[in-house]
Amino acid sequence: MDKSRLNLLHELEEKLDYRFADINLLNLAFFHSSYGNENKLYKNVSNERLEFLGDAVLDLIVSDFLYNSKSLPKEGAMTKLRSQMVCEKSFSNMAKYLDLGKYLMMGHGEYISGGSEKPSVLADTFEAVFGAIYLDSGYESAFKIVNDKFKSLFITEIETKSSFIDYKTMLQEYNQKTSRDKLKYKIVKEEGPDHDKKFFVEVYEGNLVIGSGVGSSKKHAEQDAAKNALIRLRIVDE
């Protein structure tokens, strides 16, 4: 590995705040399969195995975050949320944050076609980097980097996505299975000026109030009421 390549990889180490024991692992994470197709010396070299490993490592890290997060639904909804996080879009965004395309080794044809900016390539590279970190020093190091460096992009995104869980639909499905009484949402109070109004909503099952909520809009208040009803029914956790 020449000095310029080594300096480039050290630059990424600074971004990650992590120093590799084996810098060759990090270098391997950037070998796109197209590079070997055009360079006989690297014919059988690619980051695909690291990508496979990194995908599993990141899946576990996200599961770890979800398990320890508050106000998330039970297993079924957590599985759905994890699938939204362990995906091409999420990983490619994080790869862009690190500017991983800058470090890629790929064939000329792939490069001129914009390969270093393709979401699929960037996502795969992000996975490969974490596969390399895992092999270099284990799960705790990989977890620490995600936890320390990607809170604003990763953990916050988890929390944001969790806030968009459709509690009204969940409650409706439960109601249809367990009761003949229909659900009804009622605004019981409004507070504040028009630019900062709060809505207070109660959700009824027949004539029985089963949940109440508050929000900055009628829709948000209804979702909050449905969520609190599901908590009372022990369908989701607080």
Image (spheres, rainbow, N blue to C red):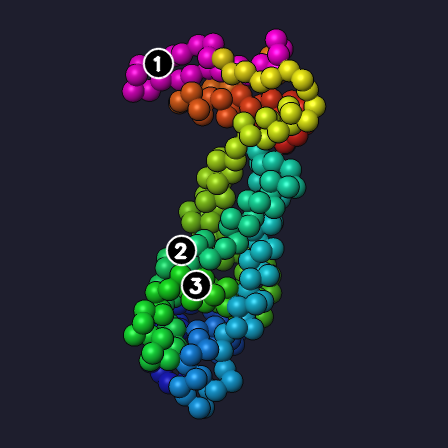
Q: Disc 1 residue type?
A: Gly
In whole angstroms, how far apart are the C-alphas of marks 3 and 1? 46 Å
The amino acid type found where label 2 is placed reads Asn
- Is there CB contact under 8 Å for labels 1 and 2? no
Q: Can you give x and y, in whole percent of width and height, for residue 238 in the image?
A: 60, 29
| Numbered label attached to residue 120 | 3
Quadrant (top left/top right/bottom left/bottom right) for the N terminus: bottom left
Q: Which residue is mark 2?
A: 93
Mark 1 residue crowding within 10 angstroms, few (<14) / some (14–19) / many (20+): few
| Corner quadrant of residue 110 | bottom left
**Left-right relation of 80 to 13:** right
Secondary structure found at label 3: helix
SS for dot 2: helix
Query: Residue at position x 37%, y 80% from top?
Result: 107
Mark 3 → mark 2, Cα distance in angstroms: 11 Å
The residue lying at 38 percent from left, 12 percent from top is 191
Check disc 1 and report the residue beneath it.
192
Residue beneath the point at 47% across and 49% down = 154
Residue that lies at the very extreme toward the bottom in this rendered image: 40
Q: Main secondary structure of the magenta part?
A: strand
